[in-house]
Amino acid sequence: MNSSILSISSRGLKNSSRLYLSAAQSSNLRRVLSPQILNARATHDITLFGVRALSSVSSAPKQPNNVSKKKPAEISDAKFNLYGKRNPDWWTGKAPQQGVCPGVDKHGKITSLPALNLSPGVTKKQIQDYFDNTWTLTEVLFSAFQGHKPFFIPPPHNLRHPLIFYYGHVACLYVNTFLLAKILPAHVNAEYEKIFEMGVDEMSWDDMSKNHMIWPSVEQVHAYRKVVYEIVCRVIQSIPDEELATKGITQDSKWWGLALAFEHERIHIETSACLMNEMPAEFFKFPENFPKYFPIKMPTSTEQTRNTTNSGSPAPVQGKDYPANELIKVSASDITLGKPRNYPSFGWDNEYGFPASIIKLPTFHATKYLITNGEFYEFVQHGGYSEKCKQHWSAEGWSWRSFRNNQHPTFWRVDANTSYFQRFIFDWVPMQWDHPVIVNYHEATAYAAWRQAHGDMKLSNATKSSASDKPLSLRLTTELECRSMRGEPARHISGPMQGMAVDPVMDFGSDGSHSMVESKYKHNLNLSYGSTSPVTAFPANKKGIHDVMGNAWSWCLDYFSPLKGFKVHAFYELFSSPCFDGKHHCIQNGSFLSTGDEASVYARFHFRPHFLQQASFRLVHCEADAQQSKGPLTVDTGCEGPFSTPTNPFR
């Protein structure tokens, strides 16, 4: 076999080795390397993470146009079959096959591995497995696209880039982080690492910024991904064994950049899936390797007599199609905020507190279940999106509703026969009334105000007081209350993590379980399923509350804010701090799509109130609210500078 020789010289290692690439691999590598690398003569010692080109090339071969002059519809991707099942050449890393890619079962379904434990003793194989699982999860998701057109069409709200950006962005982040960490000495493709570097915040709901960019073709980005995959594998193999054995990977290590890139990619698995959720279903086909949807409840023959369309769901009945909800007492507790700096898993900068804060949280009552589609249907039927209920919306929320002219949640559809459907990632399915409703913050707070005015939310029989017959004040949960509902975490009793809190997303595989729902934790989390599930599908915790982790995120009242002693990390300085602006609200507890750090008990994420994610909400009644001068006790209460300013209106 013809092959080209590339010299691998890993800094920090005693030995050098030679990597033999096939002629096709070598050609592919040169296709997307930066011109400044390819323009060098072989006598120049040009290295790219120790990859030294020994070709006699004296000038760069003709490069693919990084920004094509053709319109997306004219770009030819003839190399790829982008319809139906993907050909083997689609996979730039490990193909989703059992025994080939970690996390794939005997049916070819992939799910997420447990979060990577970075303790001393972590091995290159464990790091490589986690990377392969991450990379292939992305490619399984993107294998849903039917043809190249969906890659280039922005989402309907036009507030985000088209998905071709995210297909390239996650690969680009590895390179740019490796440059910051001084793992790589030069760009792979400087143009790509510029255009794919920065996504966009979702801005205002009426910021209709147009996507004028003409992006590289799917084939070009695919070639770039293939090279980046090979480079990441070489980076992993370059980590000194002794360093992993004695130190593991800590925030002070340059290899922290590896873990950061893994978790960044996992964030975009979820956000990309949500953007797909917003686009026409005909753009996609359920990927055969993606986790299956939770079994879909089809209308029964009796229900079908109530409407003429067999495929949709009729109006729901409480107690039959969805459970009655009630408020469960959660006793006062001390909540510790701040992930320990030495905790051996990756964390984003906003998760850490120095020192950890201990906050006394008063007793409150929270709904037993996340608010379901069935419960939210009552709001819709009472004119929740009409002028009749305008008083229940915030001024900004009503402006958003009016601008979008929404009559119900975005992921609902009602046909001419009043038959209801909901959108899963790739398909419209009959409405699952007992699943959590997916809405934005504006819709959630409007429902809470309407439900309070409606006066029908009751305390559970076990927690009723003499005043329980009075209408109850209702609101969304806070970040502190979400943590309280989970209860005090168990502690590791032995090993390198002795005394530390158990994080289920790291721990669930210790009993041999393949997914979170198969484990003792029973959470619809970490891509155990490819959809939400009924709020009654899994057991309540010891406090009597369901879905305290997973299924759908919970919107919180809190503005996203730093913990005490917050410090940015040099490898991603703008991850959190730009969003400490009083315009982003916390979301907690993860969704079915959340994996790795997103599914951690320490995770702290946030979005603007008009933004859609796989997020639902709970209602809370707290008598102590009236005693708080600034309202409910939230993490942003008394937030310390420099992030608390007149323009950052924390309470």
Image (cartoon, helix red, strand yellow):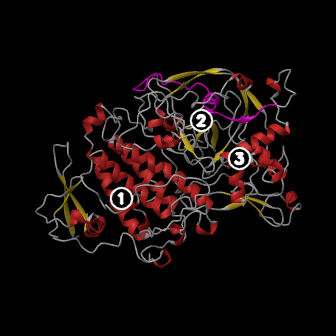
The residue shown at (79%, 49%) is: 390
Is 260 situated above or below 110? Answer: above
Distance Cα–Cα, label 3 vs label 1: 40 Å
| Label 3 residue SS | helix
Disc 2 residue type (three-letter):
Tyr
Q: Give the extent of the magenta segment.
A: 472-499
Front tag of 3 and 1: 3
Work out whether residue 66 can be spotted: yes
Query: If you read the primary sequence from the N terminus, does the residue marked by circle 2 or circle 1 appear first?
Result: 1
In depth, the one of 596 and 639 nearer the eye is 639
Percent x, y for residue 115? Answer: 46, 40
- Badge 3 is on which residue? 395
The crowd level at tag 1 (other Cα within 10 Å; few <14, some 14-19, many 20+) is: many
> In the image, is 297 to the left or to the right of 583?
right
- Badge 2 is on which residue? 521
The crowd level at tag 3 (other Cα within 10 Å; few <14, some 14-19, many 20+) is: few
- Badge 1 is on which residue? 193
